[in-house]
Image (cartoon, coloured by chain):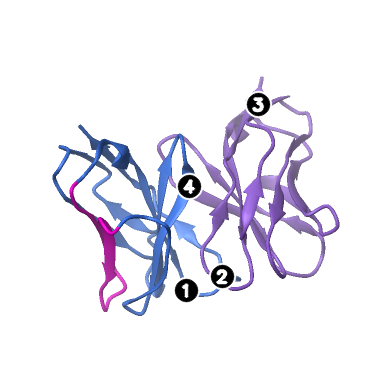
Amino acid sequence: AQSVAQPEDQVNVAEGNPLTVKCTYSVSGNPYLFWYVQYPNRGLQFLLKYITGDNLVKGSYGFEAEFNKSQTSFHLKKPSALVSDSALYFCAVRGDGGQNFVFGPGTRLSVLP
Amino acid sequence: KAGVTQTPRYLIKTRGQQVTLSCSPISGHRSVSWYQQTPGQGLQFLFEYFSETQRNKGNFPGRFSGRQFSNSRSEMNVSTLELGDSALYLCASSLEQGRNYGYTFGSGTRLTVV
């Protein structure tokens, strides 16, 4: 069975500092990994995905994520956080044979001015 | 181009009633998926349709059903509503079915059951 863990419910970071939102996964076969962001009363917005290739994936709004197969992790990063990055972030995986996303529980990011 | 459109945005229903939610995918997208989002359970997969056929189904009771029309628009129906069905229902569309395709989500329909 596929599963995604986001070990932190909440991440607080000061504006201008680097941020990391953690994600680990469990899936059979090769993982297809995604990050989405959700603002209040809105749907999910796609940030980036890892399918194959370079372990460092660059996405929207200056975000990037590093795929680490040995640690089964896919952490989301940004070099310099903005207050407008404050939102709910979801990591998701789709594995072999699974056509639907399995989402993590979400991590609420608060960027403090 | 227009994104994924979900209607209505907000809905209040009484326990025992039924409800139908609508999703219009991005033009040209043939795959539509539905998810339920609640504070307690997070995001859970309901079902996916591709070319008018249900291709995958999550672990929800039979009260939850859906369909897809020839123009790829999709509806989901919940019968005999329960208080626990209160949630944000999200629809996502993709060009094709397959795990390497990115999905675009709509803003959702917030259903409140009283």
Residue B9, image x, y percentages:
28, 44
Asked where in the image residue A57 lies, by quadrant, the reply is bottom right
Q: Amino acid at mark 1?
A: Leu
Of circles 2 and 4, the one toward us is 4
Seen at 36% across and 65% down, the residue is: B25
Report whether mark 3 lies on the same chain as mark 2. no
Sequence-wise, the earlier of marks 1 and 4 is 4
Report whether mark 3 lies on the same chain as mark 4. no
Inter-mark Cα distance, 1 to 4: 22 Å
Sequence-wise, the earlier of marks 2 and 1 is 1
Chain where mark 4 sits: B
Picture disc at residue A111: 3
User: Can you identify the residue that label 1 sits on?
Assistant: B95
Inter-mark Cα distance, 2 to 4: 19 Å
Which chain corresponds to the colour blue?
A: B
Q: Amino acid at mark 4?
A: Leu
Up the image or down, A39 lies above or below A62; here it is: above
Give the residues in magenta.
Answer: B62-80
Residue A15, image x, y percentages:
71, 25
Chain where mark 1 sits: B
Mark 4 neighbour class, 10 Å CA radius: few under 14, some 14 to 19, many 20 or more: many
Which quadrant, please, contains the N terminus of chain A? bottom right
Inter-mark Cα distance, 3 to 2: 31 Å
Up the image or down, A66 lies above or below B70; here it is: above
Sequence-wise, the earlier of marks 2 and 4 is 4
User: Can you identify the residue that label 2 sits on?
Assistant: B101
Asked where in the image residue A19 lies, by quadrant, the reply is top right
Residue B90, image x, y percentages:
39, 51
In the picture, measured across the screen, residue B111 lies left or right of residue A58, that is left
